[in-house]
Image (cartoon, grey):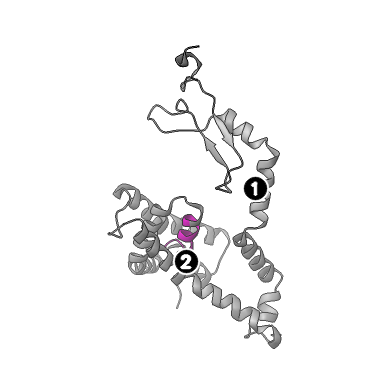
Amino acid sequence: IDEQETREDPETAPPTVATNDADSEDVVVILSDHHRRNDGEPFVPLSLWLDFLTRRSVWKRITIKVLTNPIIWGILGGFFLTLTKLGPRYLNPKSDEYVPGLGWIFATCKWFGDMVSPLSLFTMGVWMHGQGIRRLLFQVPVATAVLCMVSKLVLVPLVMVGLAYGLSLDDEAGRAAVLIAALPISMASFSLASHYKIGATLLSENVALGTLLLLPTILLWSLAMDRIGIFVTD
């Protein structure tokens, strides 16, 4: 039999889904060459997604990932301590009902919180050095960077103005909400992007530019609110 006839045509070869890889815990989707858009970019057909999502092993792995994710447990723990008033009432040293024996919990949580920003900056610097990036800015298209900055530093605070009015916040709380919304994205977002290997370059750009524009953005929003006469404080 001719070898040319027995060889499978790559144009008609079906896609394969690998859910178990000895070298990786992540689910790997292998696409054939014909699963590409007109611009040459690969895409995942709907039929492949449906086959992927109907596998019991996939949902088992997703559940295990969620239940063992320290980020989710940290968020849930913070919600629990805050919403149940256990944290502000018994763990905060400024509270009248503070329990001295539990002070180490508050101190540990505060230490972790204070460590986030410097550790994220350090992580971003190490990542950029490992990528061989000499220049900090403009690693993404200028138009993309400008759009991100306008969205975060202008549009998001505008949305917060509407929410503050909708929730009938007083002037002090409303002003604080708008100014917090005008802050750049959290530096911890880069650590998450680097860990999950998605969008690290774009987020590093956003963190760098947002930090550079932090002071003028806050000053401009404060002056704008004073000039318009919204959320004016003494």
In the rendered image, residue 185 lying in the magenta stretch gets the answer yes
Q: Earlier in the sequence, mark 2 or mark 1?
A: 1
Residue 209, position as x, y percentages in the image: 34, 60
Task: For the residues labelled 2 and 1, say whether their Cβ atoms are less than 8 Å apart.
Answer: no
- Depth check, mark 2 against mark 1: the one in front is 1
Please give the residue where the numbered disc 2 appears in the rendered image: 180
154 on left or right of 177: left
Residue 225, position as x, y percentages in the image: 40, 66
Q: Is residue 99 visible?
A: no
145 on left or right of 100: left
The amino acid at mark 2 is Ile
Alpha carbon of mark 2 to alpha carbon of mark 1: how far?
A: 34 Å
In the rendered image, residue 66 lying in the magenta stretch gets the answer no
Please give the residue where the numbered disc 1 appears in the rendered image: 62
Q: Is residue 167 visible?
A: yes
**Residue in the image at 37% along x and 54% along y:** 150
Q: Nearer the viewer, residue 1 or 68?
A: 1
Residue 71, position as x, y percentages in the image: 59, 61
Give the magenta-colored segment's residue range. 183-194
The quadrant where residue 94 appears: bottom right
The amino acid at mark 1 is Ile
Q: Nearer the viewer, residue 77 or 41?
A: 41
